[in-house]
Amino acid sequence: MDTIASLFSFITTPVSWVIVQFHKVYGSIFGPDTGWAWGLSIVSLVILIRICLIPLFVKQIKSTRAMQTLQPEMKKIQERYKNDKQRQSEEMMKLYKETGTNPLSSCLPILAQSPFFFALYHVLNGIATGDKIGVINEQLLESARKAHIFGAPLAAKFTDGSAKVESLGASLTDVRVVTAIMIVLMSASQFFTQRQLMTKNVDTSVKTPFMQQQKMLMYVFPVMFAVFGINFPVGVLVYWLTTNVWTMGQQMYVIRNNPTPGSKAQAAYLERLYKHVTQHGKTRRRSEKAIVKAIVAKGRDRNEAERKFINALTKVGYAAQVDGTVIKSEAQAAAQAEDGTPTSAAAAKRQQPKRQSKSQRQSAPAKAAGEPTSLIKSGAPEDDKPSAAAEAARTQPAAKPGSAGRSKAQSGQRKGGPQRPKSPSKK
């Protein structure tokens, strides 16, 4: 163990130094030998490490998005060269090189965090065995051995026997209960984090093997944490539980504000963005402008949620611009400027008139000629009779446009010869 400690002293020494510095701060508040002082020192170490890893986390998100975009192309390559594994690998590497993606980028935060995890495990294990690690001297070592978190020593494990637990000044029952609860919370937080990613932030329009792999990891990782957790000291469980909670909160923020295109989270985000734009008439933050800009640039390649967002803006008189801003549509503004009516009223004025029935269309020419709508009685005097032109217009169907001359010729007298006597119309 001493040989391993000397090999990895380049990382164990900085980690132990950071813990000691945090312990000085919290020890002055809660007491140097308390579990609060040492426990909060570990939590602060986690927060410091995760803040330093934020750039890698951003890179992980971009790499994951790029891999999701490439899944259809990867599937085509697998189907095309399913009998030639070597050619398949070559085409995959060519695809990664052309698109500038790296499958290992999604694992960068975990890989970067692993040395710190190993260093902390080694430091806490040294506290349990009474070995000095890094800058932790005998005084700090004795103080850490006295520190208890809810009755469980920092260096105690779930698998420790009663004799070892008693040497650390605790009972086996307290250690088993505290470690079991922390292992369950650690596994549950890991499961919820992965499930949140699968149910809300995955493009549901594309079914790929990548989604099946992620779904499998959602169940495998919590089991792995539970199996390995029984061999972790309480201090390491505090570290791992804290980093899981941080990851869960960080992922919730990313899913809410920068969701994956085509996911349920994107549909919810665009709905919130639509409500804000219609209320304030503009986009608020740079991230919102970047998302609107990406949607406009897609053109016809937009997914269903993006098309619904653009159409909803158009209906209320707004237009998304190529730079990500949202402005009032000129056509809609002109329609409102004419009469000062709001959008709904202006739209109502532009509606087409109701379609007329056949009888209404036939009676239209007669009304235009001044014919009364009631029928002429058979016994009416000749002076009150309608003219021949009106009679012909009433008895014949409505004339088509351009046939007025023909109707007039038909309603006139016959050319040459005696005229037929007029008779009153019949009902």
Image (spheres, grey):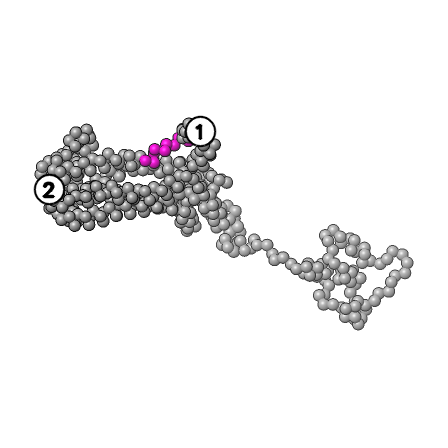
Q: Give the crowd class for mark 1: few <14, some 14-19, many >=20 residues within 10 Å.
A: few
Q: Nearest the camera: 5 or 415?
A: 5
Q: Are marks 1 and 2 in contact (CB under 8 Å)?
A: no
Total labels: the figure holds 2
Element assignment for label 2 = helix
Which residue is under mark 1?
84
Residue type beneath disc 1: Asp
Q: CA distance from mark 1 to mark 2?
A: 62 Å
Is residue 143 inside the magenta stretch? no
Task: Where is residue 298? Give x, y as percent.
Answer: 47, 39
Q: Is residue 47 above or below residue 100?
A: below
Asked if one can make out residue 260 in the rendered structure from this viewpoint, the answer is no
Task: Where is residue 136? Give x, y as percent.
Answer: 13, 36
Residue at horizontal 37%, vertical 35%? 63
Which of the numbered marks, if any, corresponds to residue 143? 2
Residue at horizontal 54%, vertical 55%? 348
The quarter in which the N terminus is drawn is top left
| For residue 266, side relative to residue 169 (left or right) | right
* Magenta highlight range: 99-107
Is residue 100 inside the magenta stretch? yes
Q: Nearest the camera: 28 or 327?
A: 28
Residue type beneath disc 2: Ser
